[in-house]
Amino acid sequence: MEMEFENLVRENIRELEAYSCARGEFEGAGAVLLDANENPFASGYNRYPDPYQRELKQQVARLKEVDVSRLVLGNGSDELIDMLIRTVCVPGRDNIIVFSPGYSMYEVSARVNGTEVRNLVLDDDFMPEWEGIFERVDERTRIIFFCTPNNPVGNVIPLDEIRRVASRFDGLVVVDEAYIDFADVPSATSLRGECPNVVVLQTLSKAWGLAGLRVGICMAEPGLVKYLNKVKPPYNIGSVTQRMALEALKNVDLFRERVEEIKQERERVLVALRGMACFERVYDSEANFLLACTPCYREVYDYLLAHGLVVRVRHIPPRLEGGLRITIGTREENDLLIRVLKDFR
Ligand code: PMP
């Protein structure tokens, strides 16, 4: 299925020239580089990074089994969220659809960029009310953001539902899969070909353990990638990051081992928290965190903090139930959490 992205992308971006890098035109070694106003004295860092991130993209493409032409890399997926909004939403005119509870940066980026946010509350099972979405979509709706597994709950949205929404909607359906490697479900990248308006976001910050490097991955139709590359700052990923990420991605065995360990720990911590009187409810999760709700969440939060354990408070609409989002740590960290919580009150 083909899609015309021309109608979706902002007019001023359609008309832009994509950034092009002169040294990319020279093939071979030993060029004298006088094209980018760099300092000639070698420091290891005196040259700009590769604006096309070619080596890193090739490695990501192999790993994710997608073509390089479908990839855009960002300074974290937060940058990609921002780039997507800036590429398709006209400030003061367009809107996006988000769900709550959900990840907050879709709304932040939209508002920074003058884009209206239509917030839909998830149902009691933390699922969108599917028909309700289309009551809020209008001709100015450019993006629907889904987060699966969802932050801060950890539940996943079935791909069939995403497929159904994407086939009824003219804009982009962005599926944020920051936590997908902790889940036992297929990625929305499997919808490629079928749903050209589906854009998948992943990151090296979570399962790959590289949050400090800042690498986000966007997988989309080449027809859209073309425009995203016009919006992307040329040097958005530093040379050290590119090199370190490339090295880290070669160690798939270590990645799998760590993900397995975190998943096992998640189940162990879940059972332990469910056995505690201080939490009313602890939700199943396919991510690397657990949402534990209790009316006395503040006291539990302060108590944990006093014991050197930092978790996150989350307010869960519609009931504004108070919850603590607790990241799964190492075995020792989780043991400490459980030990400290057992002594609460
Ligand atoms: N999406 C979701 C759902 C997240 O939870 C996060 C990080 N908290 C991000 C995106 C951003 O991740 P990063 O910018 O590190 O890739």
Image (spheres, helix red, strand yellow):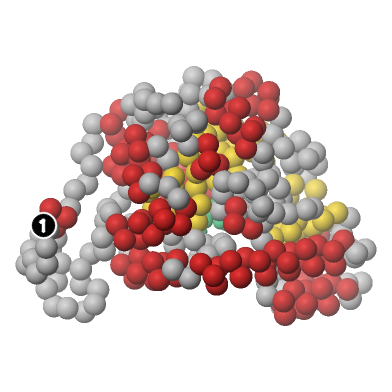
**Residue 125 location in percent, x, y?**
78, 40
Can see residue 74? Answer: no
**Residue 46 location in percent, x, y?**
20, 72
Q: Quadrant of residue 158?
A: top right
At 59% from the left and 57% from the top, the residue drawn is 181
Q: Quadrant of ligand 1?
A: bottom right
At 38% from the left and 44% from the top, the residue drawn is 70
Q: Quadrant of residue 241?
A: bottom left
Ligand 1 within 8 A of label 1's CB? no
Q: Residues within 10 Å of mark 1 (few under 14, many from 20)?
A: few
At 29% from the left and 34% from the top, the residue drawn is 13
Q: Is residue 101 above or below residue 249?
A: above
Say left or right for 176 vs 43: right
Q: Is residue 44 above or below residue 232?
A: below
- Viewer-nearest residue: 310 or 84: 84
**Quadrant placement of the N terminus:** top left
**Residue 56 location in percent, x, y?**
35, 60
Circle 1 is placed at which residue position?
26
Mark 1: secondary structure: loop
Q: Amino acid at mark 1?
A: Phe
**Quadrant placement of the C terminus:** bottom right
